[in-house]
Amino acid sequence: MRDAVCNCRFHFNHNVFKLGLLGCFILTSLLALTACPSPAPTESRQIMRIALETAPQRLDPRYAVDVASQRVVQLVYNGLVRLDAQAKIVPDVAQSWETPEPATYVFHLRRDVIWHDGERLTAADVHYTYTSLLDEKNESPKRASFDKIQSIEVMDDYTIRFVLSEPFAPFLTNMTLGLIPRPRAGEAERNLDAHPVGTGPFKFDRIEPDVAVHLLAHDDYFEGRATIDGVVLRILPDAMVRLFELQKGNIDLIQNALPPDLLTPLRSDEQFSVIQAPGTNFMYLGLNCQDEILKHVEVRQALAHAIDRQAVVRHVLSGLATLADGILPAGHWAYEANVSRYTYDPDRAAQLLDQAGFPDPDGDGPQPRFQLTYKTSQNEEGRRIAEVLQEQLRQVSIAVEIRSFEWGTFFGDIRAGNFQLYALTWVGVTEPDIFHYVFHSQSVPPAGANRGRYLNRQLDALLDAGRRSTSQEARQAPYSQAQILIATELPYVPLWHRTNVAVLRSTFRGYQLTPSGDFRVIRTVEPNKPAKAS
């Protein structure tokens, strides 16, 4: 999620805000277009061109955690199982499975799955995927999600057994991890970041660093060849550049990567279909709970009361979001509605800051109670949100310095705990075990995503309990208690769940938005007429 800097300030008069922002966008975007001319079509194959905001960081599914990387992984790899549009676990490479005992899973593999290099997938590849991920020296950020695996046994070429140390409810959901090929005889371990090899509907062709990732249809895909010949994922950090490239015919799909204000002219243009659907993507304000200021729960609660989330949704997101109580959306089976909520209340925020020992030094004067640094990528919308929050926090005498970085540097700082405030989005939330991944004491990076270093033994016990039972009813109670505790302690400030919005050029049809915005559906998109290739 990342791009070109715009120094326009947010104005609370919405009309002034839109005019100032548009002018700044046009200037920066024209400069970007001048510097980066669009590639000319070179052939007549049916290639779908998709805009990404940022370059993928890793193409090896054991390490891919950012959104752009996950989008590529979804097209290139398969897991043992996958989640359908309703987040139900369905077969993928495994055609069936059974649980002879509560902590034992036996998977029976399809026999027609072909790697992109022409070899046939076997249980030995599955064994290699998980043993390499669990190897501590590899430092996979996903390892903690699989630490209940006690043993993996290849029973025959197409049967593999996993034995867990105890029953573990999220196990099947976690088995959506993309499978990788074992090294061939005499071959060193492959560098899958440089040249990914999977079994998915699209195979790697080439990468132009920070420009584009090129994929071609996998002719031997076990569910049938894709209806298009390939995909080019173009990295276009600037929103106006993405819009201009779409309007010029050089981009066919943009998903969740255009500011809402820029969607307006596209809705009435017959060249495009603007598709909207409810989403599970959760945006939050991340807090460093080890910081000398933010370690006080009253300060974290004050931040929540000082932020007018509804104003941001209305003015910045054009209403394309719903306010969030926590990571799980309402309607999820584990969602707990009876949690603390933080309405916009600057007076209450001021009281909490006083209680925490941070009084306003000069009343209504210019001196702040303290200063915080807010880190963000160079994504335009992210910077706009940062500027709104900066102004809202100023109203309760908290000074905020916004520091913008290119995506790799920004995300590296977040994983390293080198921040006070930041905002990011969790994409495609389905399994409540995400709470373990982002808040458990054992999930501090690189073992997980507890980037704010929040440590709470009571919460750890609840999240461990939520994992142990495979009964949905039994899991409900610990996850309800965990959500109540998280909403009180606020290691995150929940912001909103975004509405998914895709813009599809009329040269293609059949694109279906899923709640998670999964790119796997691209396999069945059909061309309406010959499309230009990149």
Image: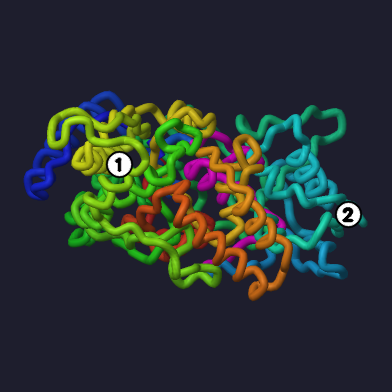
Q: Which residue appears at 18% of the width and 56% of the height?
A: 264
Decide which of tag 1 and tag 2 comes sooner along the chain.
Answer: 2
Q: Which residue appears at 65% of the width and 60% of the height?
A: 173
Mark closer to the observer (1, 2): 1
Q: Nearer the viewer, residue 7 or 118?
A: 7
Q: Which residue appears at 28% of the width and 39% of the height?
A: 386
Does the magenta portion include 317? no
The x and y percentages for residue 341 are 37, 61
The x and y percentages for residue 34 are 23, 26
Q: Name the disc covering residue 157, or none.
A: 2
Q: Nearer the viewer, residue 8 or 342?
A: 342
Q: Which residue appears at 37% of the width and 27% of the height?
A: 405
Amino acid type of the residue tagged 1 in the rendering: Asp
- Is residue 428 toward the left or the right of residue 299 in the image? right
Does the magenta portion include 74? yes
- Is residue 341 toward the left or the right of residue 56 in the image? left
Quarter of the image with the N terminus is top left
Label 1 crowding class (10 Å Cα cut-off): few <14, some 14-19, many 20+? some
Q: Name the disc covering residue 354, or none.
A: 1
The single residue placed furthest to the top in the displayed view is: 35
The x and y percentages for residue 503 are 32, 56
The x and y percentages for residue 499 are 35, 60
The single residue placed furthest to the right in the displayed view is: 155
Magenta highlight range:
56-85
Q: Secondary structure at mark 1?
A: helix
Amino acid type of the residue tagged 2 in the rendering: Asp
